[in-house]
Image (cartoon, rainbow, N blue to C red):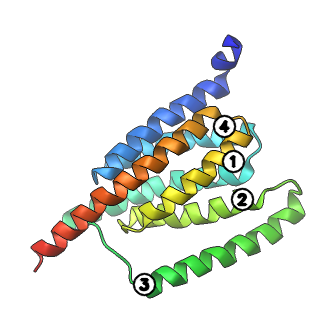
Amino acid sequence: MLANYLNPFTIIEWLGVVFTLFYNLFLIRENIWCWLFGILCSLCGMVVFFHTQLYGQMFLYLFYTAMGFYGWWYWKQAEKKHIHIINWSIQKQVWVLASGILLSAISYSIVIKIQSNISIMDITLTVFSFIATFKETRKVLSGWLYWVILNLLSAFLYFNNGLMGYFILSLVYSVLSVYGFMAWKKIYLDTKNESK
């Protein structure tokens, strides 16, 4: 049993968990340092998911790493321009949701020909995580709502693959996503009221 905890991949998994928690806490506070921890946790995730052959999740964490650098750059620019939390129109939200569903279906139909044991859930989580991450980098309020659902579904996926660190993290992250939504909504409303 102790050997499982000393396994290098288990250690990397738990390091990823710690970095992800720091990422989330700084993100909730709209603090740019969240992106440093986002990059670190993403690198850990790539290693773990490659090892467990969850290639959709591995690719997702590669994307997270790139988005960490983009998020850092964008937030730096937003800071100079005093841009805080924004909200997209209903039409834009519906368009993004429909695009995500279509892209998930297309991606699955392509990937299933290459990797026969790929899960539709893995692909759909990957696509919608791309969308939610992009929303975070652009400070879009509704990104948090995506994460509440995505993390609950991810918890199920990780539990089924024996990744207990990521399972626990996903449950915690779902709760933090609710808190993050409320915190960002307050910032959004305060900023909106100040501009009146």
Q: CA distance from mark 3 to mark 1?
A: 30 Å
Q: Earlier in the sequence, mark 1 or mark 2?
A: 2
Q: At label 2, which amino acid type do we have?
A: Met
Residue 84 position, x and y percent, is 25, 66
Q: Earlier in the sequence, mark 3 or mark 2?
A: 3
Cβ atoms at labels 1 and 2 below 8 Å apart: yes
Q: Is residue 189 above or below residue 170?
A: below
Residue 174 position, x and y percent, is 48, 50
Is residue 72 among what the camera can see?
Answer: no
Q: Report helix, strand or loop for mark 3.
A: helix
Q: CA distance from mark 3 to mark 4?
A: 37 Å
Cβ atoms at labels 3 and 2 below 8 Å apart: no
Cβ atoms at labels 3 and 4 below 8 Å apart: no
Q: At label 1, which amino acid type do we have?
A: Leu
Q: On the image, numbered disc 2 is attached to which residue?
A: 121
Q: On the image, numbered disc 4 is attached to which residue?
A: 48
Q: How many marks?
A: 4
Q: CA distance from mark 4 to mark 1?
A: 14 Å
Residue 22 vs residue 172, the one in the foreground: 172
User: Is 25 situated left or right of 173 in this image?
Assistant: left
User: Is 94 situated left or right of 55 in this image?
Assistant: left
Q: Report helix, strand or loop for mark 4.
A: helix
Q: Is residue 3 above or below residue 120?
A: above
